[in-house]
Amino acid sequence: CDQGLGKRNWVSLRVGIFVEKMSAFVPVGGFVTPSGTRSAAACGEKKLGAGVVVQRVRNVSGICMMSEYETPVTRRLSDALKERDVEERLEREEAEKRRLAEEAKREARQRKIAFMENIPDNTPVGTVDEYMFREGVKETLEKLDHDLVGLWPVKSRVREIAALLIVDKMRNKLGLETAVPSLHMSFTGAPGTGKTTVAMRMGQILQKMGYCRKGHLVVATRDDLVGQYVGHTAPKTKEMIKKAMGGVLLVDEAYYLYNASNDRDYGQESIEILLNVMETERDNIVLVYAGYEDKMNNFYSFIPGMSSRIGNHIHFPDYHPEELVEIAKVMCRDLQYEMHPHAEFVFYEYIQARMQMPYFSNARTVRNAVDRARMRAAIRLFNNAIAGYNGGMVSAEDLMTILPEDCVSAQELLSRGDAIVE
């Protein structure tokens, strides 16, 4: 490059070069390098980025210039054809799989129709008792009768669900069409009416009938499902669902999940996750929502999609005094105690008085009263032994019997006023 290039030649140089972008052509180093010469290697190409090349152009006068332009991305035609062939082959394979699946389904349906047309109407399938015994449902229902006193409407509804599942099994054996019914449930009633016990027994029935893999029961409240900050609720809810997968998830006092006065409450996120699981995982998990009847009705009114997904609404009524005395006797029996006949009468009067007072919780109140009677019986035996009664000897009958003085009487309860002690 000549450092002494005149102004006229420089102008003619600028006009003579064809450029795609006028602003892209600038002389190297401003105009001409101070040394006056540039090597041929300096007038080559240099990569700046993806597809962009800076080219130093040498004109007839020896000036080195730079231009910027897009380099087209090219590939071999054979590679493009190979990729196209692979895509077409995959599409053909998928279409063939769909066709074969539809054909197999159609053939299976035709075989079932032919089988049902030729099968005699009096073909024996088995008795209901055989299925109940074979599947273990009969044993579970007997345990439910043994553990729960009263609650005949609840037991009747549980038997209805069990009957549906049994008949569904019999239809399946014969080859008839079957479908898994909606097993999600709603339990309403006061505390201590046996909702948790029934949920546990239902899980066992569903597991033995093949509708649940494990049949275990997981109890959750708002604290187990709803987080304290943004992004914390979803992991907690999904973790509880994961624990209950294959069994029953009992959401106790479910109405606390929704706060109508706060639109930003995190419980709404937990409800949305539960609704989605009720629909998508209905074959893998059974959800049971429990709580007071009036509050549960309000909860369902705020979440319309919840009630429509629940196929079994079961109400648990309060116990009668006679049933609560029977529950107390069952609790004593399980602990290898016996309640004296006179003690039963004292306990009955106590229950009648206690039902009129606040914070009554049905079977939970009975359990607390039985524990109090056991404690009083232990204190009585200990004091008699220390005092030398019967030579300080304690018999097996003494250790197993609850006497009338061991129970809190109705007069003693009423004399305490507001200080309620079971």
Image (tube, rainbow, N blue to C red):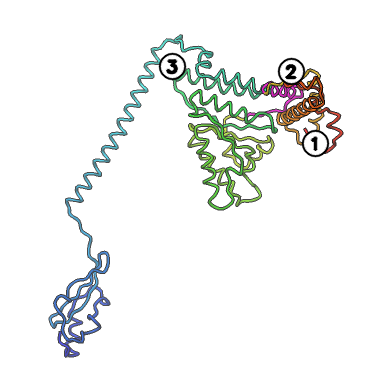
Q: Mark 2 or mark 1, which has the lower sequence index?
A: 2
Mark 1 belongs to which amino acid? Ile
User: Mark 3 and mark 1 in contact (Cβ < 8 Å)?
Assistant: no
Q: Nearer the viewer, residue 337 or 268?
A: 337
User: Mark 1 and mark 2 in contact (Cβ < 8 Å)?
Assistant: no
**What quarter of the picture does the N terminus occupy?**
bottom left
Q: Quadrant of residue 294?
A: top right
Residue 359's place in the image compared with 235, above or below, is: above
In the image, which is nearer the foreground, mark 3 or mark 2? 2
Q: Position of residue 177 (x, y in %)?
A: 44, 22
Query: Which is the main secondary structure of the residues drawn in magenta?
Result: helix
- Which residue, given by chain and number where applicable, does mark 2 sit on? 397
Q: Residue 155 got which mark?
A: none
**What quarter of the picture does the C terminus occupy?**
top right
**Which residue occupies 23% across, 44% down?**
86
Cα–Cα gap, marks 1 and 3? 60 Å
Q: Nearer the viewer, residue 151 or 246?
A: 246
- Which residue, given by chain and number where applicable, does mark 3 sit on? 174
Q: Residue 420 got which mark?
A: 1
Residue 11's place in the image compared with 341, above or below, is: below
Q: Mark 1 or mark 3, which has the lower sequence index?
A: 3
Cα–Cα gap, marks 2 and 1? 31 Å
- The stretch drawn in magenta includes residue 332: yes
Mark 3 belongs to which amino acid? Leu
